[in-house]
Amino acid sequence: MNESARTSRTATFEGQLARPPFFYRQWMLAGNPAYFFDRLVQDYGDFVHYRGLFSFYLVNHPSLVKQVLQETNKSFDKNSVIYDRFRNPFGDGLVVAEGDRWKRSRRLMQPLFGQQAIQQYFPLMVDSAEQMAKRWEAACSSGQVFDAAQEMNHITLQIAGRALFHDSFDQMSAQISEWTHVINLYSAKPPLPVVRSYWFPSRINRRLKNTLAEFHEFLQQMIDARRDGDGQSDLISRLLATRDEETGQPMSDQEITEEALGMIIGGHETSSSALAWLWCELDQHPEVRDRLHAELDEVIGSDRLSPDHLPQLVYTRMVLEETLRLHPPFWFENRNVAADDVELGGAALPRGSIVAFSRYSLHRHSGFWQDPERFDPERFRPDHEENKRSTYAFVPFGGGPRICIGVHLAMMELVTVVAILAGKYDVRLDASHRHEMAAHLTMTPKYGVRVKLEKRR
Ligand code: HEM
């Protein structure tokens, strides 16, 4: 590692705010926005004031990202035009909530996502992954080519759905899958003026309104059934049972509905995209794949995956972290400047402006990652030099007070699914696979992940 890269790791931002010409490469935004933001930081550095159809301050230095994330709820908030759009499907749920509502929801929900509390979801994760492994047997023996991205979407929706709605998910899975699809479609569209306003009678607005009416009705039925003591134990029943330690109040039905919607959307597309990329990377890096397989064989062998295995799957976790570095599912972040003249990187940002960063670019910053384009899980070995870098150089789950509430749940899910599927199968890209990335709400392989299977054990 060269000395300048080492120094810049711990450094605070010392550059200056750059101002590209108005509308600089605006056209790129209509193509792949992650490449557009990457181009901006390549051309103008780690702090850019972009002025075009949308104007924003782009930050790409860990110390600036750290300040924005840590000062969220103070100097920065989520009252941006981009987050406003998410308020249509998610109401005032945790993902978009502000002020007292956010504080209360986070306080009430945090205990449900602690390391201990999430253990109860492990059996359903194992069950879903084993079901998938069994289903894959036919494709394996016939040599059938299929889309692993679609399969990952299926399994992560099933896991989130079963965690939230227990058995009721299985009866309603096709419907829930359609509802989540529409909400994702809506959320992925950029917030253009007028045509994207919620009152505008566009097709997607109508579809979203119908979907939300049906989804809310389903959620109300779930809440009523759990309240009537139907004996099902799931996230809905746990949300119903929570009491605010400050006021003793339970959550209202509307709060539970909004949180359930946020969790099913926030919790499945993200994990599904990480898993889809993982299969691509494993195919491209046989030495990593072999080591992963060796670890799974050594730690689990022919046993059934148990919670005791998880902490031993160190390399599996490193491979997942490296996947989340190069392919961060929620690749884009933004905040509204919530106070007058907030100081950031030596500039005074006016109230109401937008600060954004792209995890795609941050996670590939050459000052913080050596040979950043290379897929190398070794970076995440606990004693590795790169682990001394700023932790805000790697933020797939965010940071500060609004860090992802599902981070432990998500990591347990990812490790479990990989351990079971890669334990049984060698998942190989088919020649028809096309390597391209799409960056909408999440970052996904544009044409899916076309794979064939070989049996391992
Ligand atoms: C690989 C999987 C996941 C990734 C990459 C991911 C990523 C993120 C990120 C980056 C944020 C922070 C956004 C910000 O700074 O504003 C976030 C917040 C959140 N995530 Fe996740 N997430 C994942 C899985 C999950 C799961 C499984 C759940 C389900 C419980 C979940 C629920 C949430 C919620 C409710 C928030 C809002 C937290 C708050 O504002 O207080 N996520 N997630």
Image: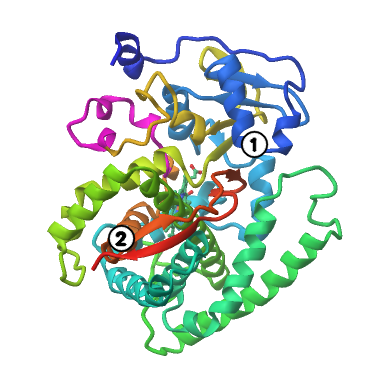
Residue at 43 percent across and 49 percent down: it is 280
| Secondary structure of residue under mark 1 | helix
**Amino acid at the residue labelled 1:** Pro
Mark 2 secondary-structure assignment: helix
The answer to whether residue 111 is seen in the rendering is no
- In the depicted structure, whether residue 170 falls above or below residue 335: below
Residue 390 colored magenta? Answer: yes
Q: Is residue 230 visible?
A: yes
Q: Within the image, what quadrant is residue 400 found in?
A: top left
Q: Nearer the viewer, residue 354 or 408?
A: 408
**445 is within the stretch colored magenta:** no
The image position of residue 264, as x and y in percent, is 51, 64
User: Looking at the rendering, in which quadrant would you find the N terminus?
Assistant: top left
Closer-to-camera residue (148/73): 148
The residue sitting at 61% across, 78% down in the picture is 175
Gap in Å between the C-alphas at discs 1 and 2? 32 Å
Q: Is residue 49 left or right of residue 53?
A: left
* Span highlighted in magenta in the image: 378-397
Residue beneath the point at 70% across and 38% down: 31
Q: Position of residue 193 (x, y in %)?
A: 82, 43
Q: Which mark is residue 422?
A: 2
User: How many residues crowd mark 2 within 10 Å: few (<14), some (14–19), many (20+)?
Assistant: many
Instruction: Please state the horizontal and vertical placement of residue 30, each as a whole percent of the image.
Output: 73, 38
Q: Closer to us: mark 1 or mark 2? A: 2
The residue tagged 1 is 33
Instruction: Name the quadrant containing residue 180.
Output: bottom right
Does 333 sit above or below residue 205?
Answer: above
Disc 1 CB within 8 Å of nearest ligand 1 atom: no
